[in-house]
Every structure is written in structure tokens, then in C-alpha cells.
Image: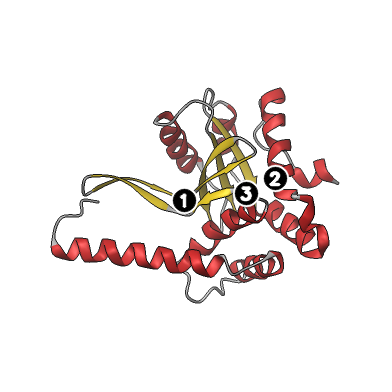
Amino acid sequence: MAVGSTTDIAEHVSDRRRAKQFESAIRQLDWPGLFDLYCQIEARETPGWPSGRAFEYLVLRAFELDGAHVEYPFRVTEGRETLEEIDGAFYLDGRAHLVESKDRDANVQIAPIAKLRNQLLRRPAGVVGIVFGRNGFSSPARTLASYGAPQAILLWEGEKVKWLLGQCRQGEAEARLFAKALELKYRHYVERAIPTLDVKEAMA
């Protein structure tokens, strides 16, 4: 999107202001609050949040609570032109991650994985991509992620996000479960070339 006219500039400023409001709202939530928000997302009862936005901020906040430095959804611009819209990034345990989140009522197809792969091509080697799909992933999407090397792209299903939130809500907050789950997913991808480790099964 080119930001040129007075109207475009005003809309751009308004978007940034709303993003700060979303960031402030999500940072007020702890583990029980995030679990409740996830249930509201499932029920499609998230007043004040545009479609899909609550899920984007929720997954980032979960990693922030586990100690990550988080950049909430942002735009990459050149001059007044938007080149990319990024669902978020975070830095945890010495590794950088770029995030794509999809809150859909159907499985995520290949397009978001292809989009993230292209974004990773513009960034330093070693940045890990993660696609969060609230309702899982199609078989073609899983296959594409498996053959995304040298770009590493992990796939994370929404039901596993909810399970981890439930564990943290029940008193496991100090265990850094999201950080541990991510490390397990990454190691599994390195060793097995499979980006879809079931963290619930692996951590049971």
C-alpha cells in the first residue's frame, strides 16, 4: 500500500494508533486471561478485536510471558510504501522467529507457508518461521513446510496452543512451557526434517 495522500497518511497513523491499543490490551493479560481469550476466539466472541487479530496477539503474548522479546504485528516500509505486513516476531533463547498466524474455520492451505518462506528469504540465515493455524493445516501445507529448506518453517496447531495455555493457567507458568515446546519442535525439525511435532504428546 502506498501512503501518499493526506487521507492515506491519516489512515496509516490511525492504524499505528490502533496497533498500540491492541498491544496495550494484550499485555494486560496473564495466563488465565490468555486462556479465556482463546476460548472467546473459538466462540467468535472478541469484541473490540478485528477478525483474526486477537489470535495474532495472543500467540505473541504467550511467548512474551515465557521471556521472549516480542515485536507485535508490524509493517515493513520503504519510503511511504508498505512492502510487507508481518504478524509478529520474537527473540527467545538466542534464536529469532518470524510469525504468521491464521485464525480460520478451515485448515491453513499452502499460501501462508509460501508467503512466510518468501519473507524468510529476505532475512538472515537462521531466522525460524512459525505458522500458527488455529484449525490446523492441510496435507499440501504440511508437505510444503517439510520441503522449505534452507528456510526453517514450523507448523503449530491451535489446539496445542490452547493445551499449553491450559497447563500454564493451572500453575505451570514458571516452567516456560511455550519455550520448551518450541525447542522440542525445532530439535525435531533439525533431526527428523518434520515441522509438525505434536508438542502435547511429546511433553506428556
Task: Read off the residue under disc 2.
Answer: 179
Q: Residue furthest right?
A: 204
Q: Secondary structure at mark 2?
A: helix
Q: Residue at x 72, y 59 (%)?
A: 165
Q: Position of residue 132 (x, y in %)?
A: 58, 48
Q: Position of residue 35 (x, y in %)?
A: 69, 66
Q: Is residue 57 left or right of residue 35?
A: left
Task: Say the numbered circle drawn on residue 33.
Answer: none
Instruction: Please name the amino acid that badge 1 sits on.
Output: Asp
Q: Is residue 75 visible?
A: yes
Instruction: Please name the amino acid that badge 3 sits on.
Output: Gly
Nearest to viewer (mark 2 / mark 1): 2
- Above or below, 169 against 47 in this view is above
Circles 3 and 2 in contact, beta carbons < 8 Å: no
Q: Residue at x 54, y 73 (%)?
A: 46
Instruction: Please name the amino acid that badge 2 sits on.
Output: Ala
Nearest to viewer (mark 3 / mark 2): 2
Residue 141: image quadrant is top right
Q: Is residue 176 left or right of residue 90?
A: right
Q: Secondary structure at mark 3?
A: loop
Neighbourhood count class around disc 1 (C-alpha, 10 Å): few under 14, some 14–19, many 20 upward: many
Q: Residue furthest left?
A: 5
Neighbourhood count class around disc 2 (C-alpha, 10 Å): few under 14, some 14–19, many 20 upward: some
Q: Secondary structure at mark 1?
A: loop
Q: Position of residue 77 (x, y in %)?
A: 29, 45
Task: Read off the residue under disc 3.
Answer: 136
